[in-house]
Image (cartoon, helix red, strand yellow):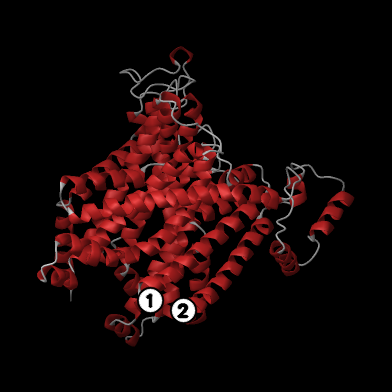
Amino acid sequence: MSAPKHKSLAYRNMWRLLRSSQFLVGGAVVAVIIIMAIFAPWIAPYEPFERDRDSRLEKPSLEHLFGTDWLGRDLFSQIVYGSRLTLYIGFVSVGIALTVGVALGITAGYFGGWWNTLVTAVVDVMLAFPSFVLALSIVAVLGPSLTNAMIAVGVRGIPVFARLARGEALRLRETEYIEAAKALGATNARVIWSSLLPNAFSPLLVMATLQFPFAILMTAGLSFLGLGAQPPTAEWGRLIVGARDLLMEAPWLVNIPGMAIMATVIGFNLLGNALRDVLDPRLQD
Amino acid sequence: MTSYIIRRILVAIPVFLAVTVLVFALRALVPGDPVEIMFFGESPPPEVVEMIHKSWGLDKPIYEQYYIYMSRIVKGDFGTSFRSRQPVMKDIAARYPNTLRLAFTGLTLAVLLGVITGVISAVKQNTLFDFGSMIVALVGVSMPAFWMALLMMYYFSVKWSLLPAMGTGTWKHLVMPSLTLGLLSASVTARMVRSSMLEVLRQDFVRTARSKGLSERVVVYKHALKNALIPVVTLIGLQFGSLLGGAFITETVFAYHGLGELGVMAINNRDFPVVQGVILVISSIYVLVNLIVDVMYGFIDPRIRYS
């Protein structure tokens, strides 16, 4: 019934996105990182952990675009391979936060009652911890590793999505089309899956995009404290820790991974801002 | 107003209790026997294990253990460090003033810089200043704190020898850590103040003020700014949380003797009494600050009190 209208809305939104400079710049940065991650073996000129005694701590040059580290490993190749980890970290931790948070939030808002009270209380308690402290506590329990850091950062994000999804469910629950779906005999699961979720999609997508850079920064922070990725990995935060004592002799070993993290985070932030402006102006900060 | 304050305090109490439950659960959730962790994974003779279990109350049911834990916390007894065998409270008491000092300096910097930049950006929307400061703010929120800290160390300590690279003690030791924390928060604050200010400037009462013939200065600083800062007050509470969280990284980089550095060392050493103590103190400070912010909010915006 409303199919053509939807199409034109999607079309209009697409146009607005394509005219947004934030979307174009952010999209370009993110595209570069995705291409780097997919084609890493073809882009990286060396094996990321291949040692070369004769070319230790070399400055960036044509031969080694980003220079080499104390074991003669090519930094450019490590950065290229590291992009895979960065994306992986973002997807896994935001994925955990999104799935668990939305499942809790949507059901809490839709069913209400004691379940809503319980979910709201859990969310409030989780938000009573400073975000990074919550992630740290979880890593403290699970032990330091990249997987655990991603889980910690993911769990830390659950209340953010639960709150948003709950609000959406509360708002949508009262709408006529949800009532219509129920009157037509749709089961609760069906109402949630085919009516609530699709309509809550935009704000959730925007939040997921904005949480992505946050997750990358936080995981890099945990790695820096020795609580995330363990050596040898090409995780960008870890590359910085490894080289921090060489800041004087080989500043590029710290600054290039630093810039890589920053560029990725800027890219996703811009993309998220653009999506928010177009899809969900209410979320504006 | 009094009833509003009482209501807010009544809400904060269960939150605080829930925080203590979670912090207590940290140790219970850790896989492995705490005694083994204490002895670096080697099991002491069973009699010794049993004795330690008894003295810690580990042989009792979990709710009783929580009760014992809480009654000790109330008395200021946070247990004994697995590693230094010193009371945890001693370390925490020695370090928390440093962390508070750091967080407050960072917060002051963030608020001053953030509000000023945000207001000017909004008033001069779409000018070079607005554009430039928002790009700087974007870089600020996107920069890993530890990288910023290392860069500062490189320039201020190593290259220009202006500030000590590490340690605690004088105001000079406070400059770089609080700059690291403050600049990141200032970026968030500036963006928020700008959009809040832009929204207020579009409202009817601002148009009325202008049409009364008031000078632009009075309109912006007397009428608009006051209203634009209301949502910023809530942000300050949240920012304080990220400052406390950020302290873990910043203090570690600058070897600044605060709770953050202590916490990170304790996590790496699996020294759970210390981990619990640090997390409990930091989260309590955060709950308290948010309570104060909420009460302030009630003072500033009377609409809140009645909702």
Give residue A88's quadrant in the image: top left
Circle 1: residue type? Ile
Q: From the image, which quarter does the N terminus of chain B lie in? A: bottom left
Q: Residue at x 53, y 74 (%)?
A: B9
- In this rendered view, identify the residue nearer to me: B217 or B230: B217
Residue B263 shows in the view: yes
Circle 2: residue type? Tyr
Residue ranking furthest to the top? A54
Work out whether mark 1 precedes mark 2 in sequence or the reverse, and give the earlier one.
2
Residue B105, x across and y down, in percent: 45, 48
Residue B5, x across and y down, in percent: 49, 76
> Badge 1 sits on which subunit?
B
Residue A84, x across and y down, in percent: 40, 39
Disc 1: which residue: B304
Element at badge 1?
Answer: helix
Q: Residue at x 31, y 54 (%)?
A: B115
Report the side of B225 relative to B296 (left or right).
left
The numbered dot on residue B4 is 2
Q: Is residue A64 above or below residue A122?
A: above
